[in-house]
């Protein structure tokens, strides 16, 4: 490889984030490049879940009055500074899919249902489009796609009520111009829901600076909340308390323990809650969010860009020799991932790497995806992963029959 290991070790010695790695429980023989799917486990999360198990055993139902019940709002306030939001603007609840549904209903209701079209992007992670279609299926609304490669502004008109868009695209890692797109959508009288699945904890996000009114995201990727950790939902203060959201459960009620027959929405972000959540997974996430309070996001972004660049540089010659396309965007438009395309062998290459302990993932059609998480990856890890990549591809190791077998999760 063109980059010497010694120079990479220097980068680690100068890395201001280096100490965070020791706060994660990482398997010894693994280089984990899949934190964009499921983040690693903070050691503190393990302890926090154990603490909640003890609390459940000793306190039983009293636990709900000892912090479990208020966790969605409390964790929302911990998460807010990571996305440029303020106290009382984020609630941690449900998942992205349900949170988009709630926001579409909430927004269209506050627009008096005058505009009939819900617009989402073709080629995005499918759940965003599926849930928009589900909403339209049960209402008078019409769903339309912005085709892959299309510009949002070309599909905006006075019929569009809501646009749903990913800030960082899950396949390419392309970062969208949040300020400009938000401005254009608002100028046409519509609203936009930003999906921050691949942004929160991956780069600096400033919702307030870009006049964002609505956003959703997840906590199991870069935020390291754990498998099945809840999603989050953001509504800027001036846009709160405007009406109902459609999943009107008791935890979103103004007085959940009054047991009134009729629904009355709680004020603020609480109205976006639905029903009972898992105290265990919230405690894992809370420990991770506490760790995130110590992270300097500018340093995180700088390291992320350096790592993705290092990986690309180390594998560039091999990619060229083996017709593997690097579709990773230029640095200023890049999330925290490297995206490669090879239709024929992409799946097998990823499987061969996994057998060597280098974990990336594969998404149809033909996408090899490698996520870079600055808190628990060193530059040396990146260099070693690149070396494995080159060895697997150059030697043809991926051609072994066992790497062609498809598992249900890729
Ligand atoms: C852009 C995007 N949106 C949504 C999701 C998943 O949504 P949910 O949390 O509802 O499963 C993902 C999962 O990877 C995603 O990448």
Image (cartoon, grey):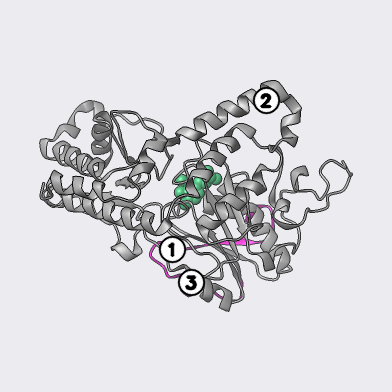
Q: Is residue 140 visible?
A: no
Please state which of the two labelled residues, at mark 1 or mark 2, is closer to the viewer.
Answer: 2
In the rendered structure, which disc, 1 or 2, sits on the residue that comes first in sequence? 2
Where does residue 59 sit, x and y in percent of width and height? 72, 25
C-alpha separation, residue under disc 1 versus residue under disc 2: 49 Å
Against 46, residue 21 (above or below) is below
Number of callouts: 3
Near mark 2 (Cα within 10 A), the count class, few <14, some 14-19 or many ≥20, is some
Please state which of the two labelled residues, at mark 3 or mark 1, is closer to the viewer.
Answer: 3
Where does residue 1 sit, x and y in percent of width and height? 11, 46
C-alpha separation, residue under disc 3 versus residue under disc 1: 21 Å
User: Does residue 245 appear left or right of residue 214 in this picture?
Assistant: right
> Does the residue tagged 1 have its C-beta within 8 Å of any atom of ligand 1?
no
Near mark 3 (Cα within 10 A), the count class, few <14, some 14-19 or many ≥20, is some
Residue marked by disc 1: 147
Please state which of the two labelled residues, at mark 3 or mark 2, is closer to the viewer.
Answer: 2
> 237 or 94: which is nearer to us?
237
> Which residue is at a point 56% across and 51% down the rendered structure image?
79
Where does residue 343 sit, x and y in percent of width and height? 26, 46
**Span of residues in magenta:** 134-159
**Is residue 152 located in the magenta-colored stretch of the structure?**
yes
Residue marked by disc 3: 179
Residue marked by disc 2: 56
Against 149, residue 375 (above or below) is above
In the rendered structure, which disc, 3 or 1, sits on the residue that comes first in sequence? 1
Q: Is residue 242 visible?
A: yes
Q: Which mark is residue 356?
A: none
């Amino acid at each position: 490889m063109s980059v010497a290991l010694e120079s990479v070790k220097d980068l680690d010695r100068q890395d201001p984030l280096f100490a965070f790695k020791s706060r994660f429980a990482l398997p010894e023989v693994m280089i984990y490049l899949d934190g964009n799917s499921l983040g690693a486990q903070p050691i503190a999360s393990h302890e926090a879940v154990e603490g909640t198990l003890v609390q459940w055993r000793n306190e039983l139902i009293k636990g709900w009055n000892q912090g479990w019940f208020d966790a969605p709002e409390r964790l929302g306030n911990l998460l807010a500074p990571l996305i440029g939001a303020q106290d009382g603007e984020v609630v941690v609840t449900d998942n992205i899919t349900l949170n988009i549904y709630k926001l579409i209903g909430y927004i269209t209701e506050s627009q008096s249902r005058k505009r009939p079209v819900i617009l989402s992007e073709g080629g995005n992670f499918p759940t965003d489009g599926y849930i928009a279609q589900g909403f339209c299926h049960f209402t008078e609304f019409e769903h339309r796609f912005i085709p892959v490669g299309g510009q949002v502004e070309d599909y905006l008109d006075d019929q569009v009520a809501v646009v749903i868009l990913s800030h960082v695209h899950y396949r390419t890692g392309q970062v969208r111009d949040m300020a400009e797109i938000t401005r254009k959508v608002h100028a046409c009288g519509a609203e936009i829901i930003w999906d921050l699945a691949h942004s929160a904890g991956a780069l600096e996000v400033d919702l307030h600076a870009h006049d964002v009114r609505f956003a959703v995201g997840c906590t199991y990727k870069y935020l390291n909340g754990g498998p099945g950790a809840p999603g989050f939902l953001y509504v800027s203060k001036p846009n709160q308390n405007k009406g109902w959201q459609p999943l009107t459960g008791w935890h979103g009620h103004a007085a959940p323990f009054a047991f009134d027959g009729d629904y009355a929405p709680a004020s603020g972000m609480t109205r976006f809650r639905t029903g009972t959540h898992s105290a265990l997974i919230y405690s894992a996430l809370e420990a991770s969010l506490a760790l995130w309070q110590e992270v300097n996001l500018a340093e995180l972004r700088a390291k992320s860009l350096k790592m993705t660049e290092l990986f690309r540089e180390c594998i560039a010659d091999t990619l060229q020799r083996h017709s593997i396309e690097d579709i990773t965007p230029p640095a200023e438009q890049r999330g925290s991932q490297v995206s490669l395309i090879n239709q024929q062998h992409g799946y097998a290459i990823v499987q061969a790497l996994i057998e060597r302990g280098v974990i990336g993932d594969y998404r149809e059609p033909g996408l090899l995806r490698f996520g870079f998480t600055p808190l628990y990856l060193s530059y040396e890890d990146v260099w070693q992963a690149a070396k494995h990549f080159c060895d697997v591809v150059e030697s043809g190791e991926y051609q072994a029959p066992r790497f062609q077998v498809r598992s249900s999760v890729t």
